[in-house]
Image (cartoon, rainbow, N blue to C red):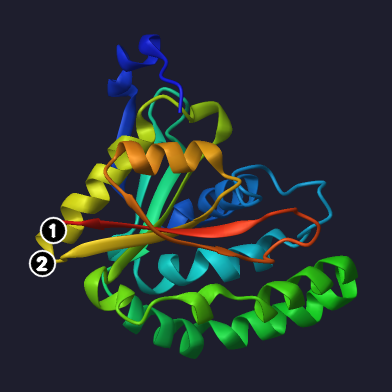
Amino acid sequence: MAEEGGFYANMSRIIIRKYQNPDCKDVLKICYKTGYMGNDLESTGKFDDMKLFGYFFCMYYLLYERDHCFVAVDKDNNCKVVGYIIGTLDTNIQIRLFIKKMLIRIGLRILYTIWKYPDTFKNIMNMLKNRTRKYTPKSLYCDYPAHFHINLLPEYQGMGIGMLLLTEFEVHVKGSAGKGIHLKTSNKNYNAIKFYEKNGYVKLLEFTDILWVGIENYKTVIFTKKL
């Protein structure tokens, strides 16, 4: 990520705080605007239901693990939420709770999506068919039990805000006796990969994936960090 020196002189305008319920709509928008390998999903035809996309990738954390969720706020722009980091301390528990808590919500929303966005439904079935858990090493969630998702609005990227969010989450995990963190990203999300490597995350595994139809040589990458 490129650094904008002028912004660093005014970083006091950015506040990192715990997620609050009124932030939900903003987090969903940011998730969607960065959900396509770091780019905006709008008008791609890949996933037109923003709410359902949020159900898959961020709503669980906002509803059931909000203590581990943080947002970046620009106080000079009407306290606008410009980024977030959301996650869990224990991925094994998170997986079980996601199945228990979210599958009914997702199923009901999919019925709407079939009617409103039939092309999106085809992509959803592809995503479910090719979910990455089958490639995950058995020891991953034991050695690196915590994980996170981090995203920023495009116009706020490359300014050091991501590092503030990541530091906040890592301190939070350490304070809860967490021993390691992992994350999954795409080999096509070049800026994200540079960001993780710069902050001490090491590539553990890379495997061919078919998350998005029509993307040549798409791979999922797992990064890890000991705390």
Res. 207 image quadrant: bottom right
Residue drawn at 76 percent across, 60 percent down: 47
The C terminus sits in image quarter = bottom left
Total of numbered circles in the picture? 2
The one of 3 and 136 positioned closer to us in this rendering: 136
Res. 125 image quadrant: bottom right
Residue 118 shown left or right of residue 53 in the figure: right
From the top left corner, tell me how far across and down residue 119 is, in percent.
88, 67
Distance of label 2 from label 1 (alpha carbons): 5 Å
Check the image and report above or below for 38 versus 210: above
Q: Amino acid at mark 2?
A: Ala
Check the image and report above or below for 205 versus 135: above
For disc 2, the marked residue is 177
From the top left corner, tell me how far across and down residue 113 is, in percent.
80, 73
Q: Which mark is residue 93?
A: none
Q: Amino acid at mark 1?
A: Lys
For disc 1, the marked residue is 174
From the top left corner, tell me how far across and down residue 182 is, in percent.
34, 62
Tell me the crowding category of disc 2: few under 14, some 14 to 19, or many 20 or more residues within 10 angstroms, Cα based: few
The N terminus sits in image quarter = top left
Instruction: Please report contact status of discs 2 and 1: CB closer than 8 Å, yes or no.
Output: yes
Q: Secondary structure at mark 1?
A: helix
Residue 146 shown left or right of residue 226 in the figure: right
The one of 94 and 3 positioned closer to us in this rendering: 3
From the top left corner, tell me how far across and down residue 35 is, in percent.
62, 52
Q: Secondary structure at mark 2?
A: loop
Tell me the crowding category of disc 1: few under 14, some 14 to 19, or many 20 or more residues within 10 angstroms, Cα based: few
Check the image and report above or below for 165 versus 114: above
The one of 66 and 7 positioned closer to us in this rendering: 7
Residue drawn at 75 percent across, 53 percent down: 216
Residue 189 shown left or right of residue 9 in the figure: right
